[in-house]
Amino acid sequence: MNTLVQRVMATRAGFGITALRVLVGIIFAAHGSQKLFGLFGGGGLAGTAQYMESLGLHPGTLMALLSGSAEFFGGVALIVGLLVRPAAVVLIATLVVAIFSVHIHNGLFMANNGYEFALALLGGAVAVLIEGAGPASVDRAITRR
């Protein structure tokens, strides 16, 4: 196997990171499905695009598609444990944009639409980036071959 691919997919982490990545992945996949498909009370692509435009993120449809796809497919990648490091990088970038374009001016706490929740998810994504997928993952199964 190519050494770069092996490095990206390698992990020495234990089951703690597995639990963290699955739970964070569920949250991301749910948020992405709100943006893309309108599930769980979300606005779907059209509603999210309108919101992105109101934030000054243009073109709104492209921004909604990119953020929704990053969250949904990145979340699914975390849940199954496939290519978790590249997924974590994309999710980290998405969270940084969300924090600085939506939440930073509201302070830390969620009660004021602050960045508290996004920061917690950012911490989970950074941990997955550093540690890898853990033992119960497709990444581990592939690198064991």
Image (spheres, rainbow, N blue to C red):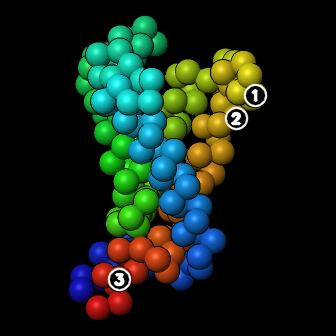
Q: Residue at horizontal 42%, vertical 24%? A: 42
Q: Whole-percent x and y of residue 20? A: 59, 61
Q: Are marks 2 and 1 in contact (CB under 8 Å)?
A: yes
Q: Earlier in the sequence, mark 2 or mark 1?
A: 1
Of all residues, the one furthest to the front in this rendering is 40
Quarter of image, res 52: top left
Judged from the image, the secondary structure of the residue bearing numbered disc 3 is helix
Judged from the image, the secondary structure of the residue bearing numbered disc 2 is helix
Disc 2: which residue: 116
Determine the CA span between mark 2 and mark 1. 5 Å
Q: Earlier in the sequence, mark 1 or mark 3?
A: 1
Lateral position of residue 134 relative to residue 76, left or right: right
Q: Residue 141: which numbered mark, if any?
A: 3
Q: Residue at horizontal 29%, vertical 91%? A: 145
Lateral position of residue 72 relative to residue 96, left or right: left
Decide: is 18 above or below 33: below
* Circle 2 residues within 10 Å: few <14, some 14–19, many ≥20: some
Quarter of image, res 78: bottom left
Q: Residue 145: which numbered mark, if any?
A: none
Judged from the image, the secondary structure of the residue bearing numbered disc 1 is loop
Q: Earlier in the sequence, mark 3 or mark 2?
A: 2
Disc 1: which residue: 109
Q: Residue at horizontal 48%, vertical 50%? A: 26
Identified by mark 1, the residue type is Phe
Lateral position of residue 2 relative to residue 28, left or right: left
Identified by mark 2, the residue type is Glu
Determine the CA span between mark 1 and mark 3. 39 Å
Identified by mark 3, the residue type is Ala
